[in-house]
């Protein structure tokens, strides 16, 4: 029975995720839409806060500035060149054998 269930679910997964399907574009557009929607919701909530103190007004200003600046993310870790933390020894001279 275990083998039959495994074959069934693997077949279903294969039918849903077929080989050769490119998910890169769908993932990028979906994530950018999700980030934009989340940013909009947070910005609306920050604007709804009523402030009486200078500290609260400053906090709102900082949050508003943080939400406005959409700085691009740098290079991912897997694309950065790896610098060796340990120096390699110099090659032996030819006369040393």
Image (cartoon, grey):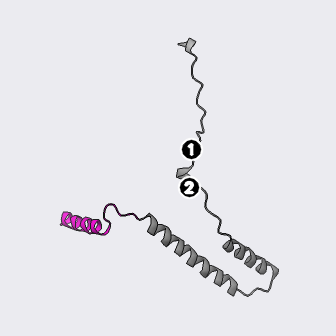
67 in magenta: no
Label 2 crowding class (10 Å Cα cut-off): few <14, some 14-19, many 20+? few
* Residue sitting nearer the eye, 65 or 25: 25
Taking the spot 53% from the left edge, 75% from the top edge, the residue there is 33
> Residue 55 occupies which quadrant of the picture?
bottom right
Dot 1 or dot 2, earlier in sequence: 2
Q: Which residue is mark 2?
A: 76
Q: In this picture, is 2 found above or below 36?
A: above
Mark 1 vs mark 2, CA separation in Å: 12 Å
Taking the spot 56% from the left edge, 44% from the top edge, the residue there is 82
13 in magenta: yes
Q: Horizontally, is 10 left or right of 44 in the view?
A: left
> Residue 46 occupies which quadrant of the picture?
bottom right
The residue segment tinted magenta is 1-22
| Residue 13 place in picture, x, y as percent | 29, 67
Task: Name the quarter where the N terminus is drawn.
Answer: bottom left
Label 1 crowding class (10 Å Cα cut-off): few <14, some 14-19, many 20+? few
């Amino acid at each position: 029975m275990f083998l039959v269930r495994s074959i069934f679910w693997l077949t279903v997964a294969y039918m849903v995720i077929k080989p050769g399907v490119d998910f890169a574009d769908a993932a990028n557009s979906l994530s950018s839409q999700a980030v934009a929607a989340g940013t909009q919701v947070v910005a609306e909530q920050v604007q709804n806060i009523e402030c009486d103190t200078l500290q609260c007004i400053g906090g709102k200003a900082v949050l508003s500035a943080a939400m406005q600046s959409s700085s691009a993310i740098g290079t991912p870790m897997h694309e950065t060149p790896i610098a060796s933390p340990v120096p390699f020894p110099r090659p032996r001279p030819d006369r040393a054998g």
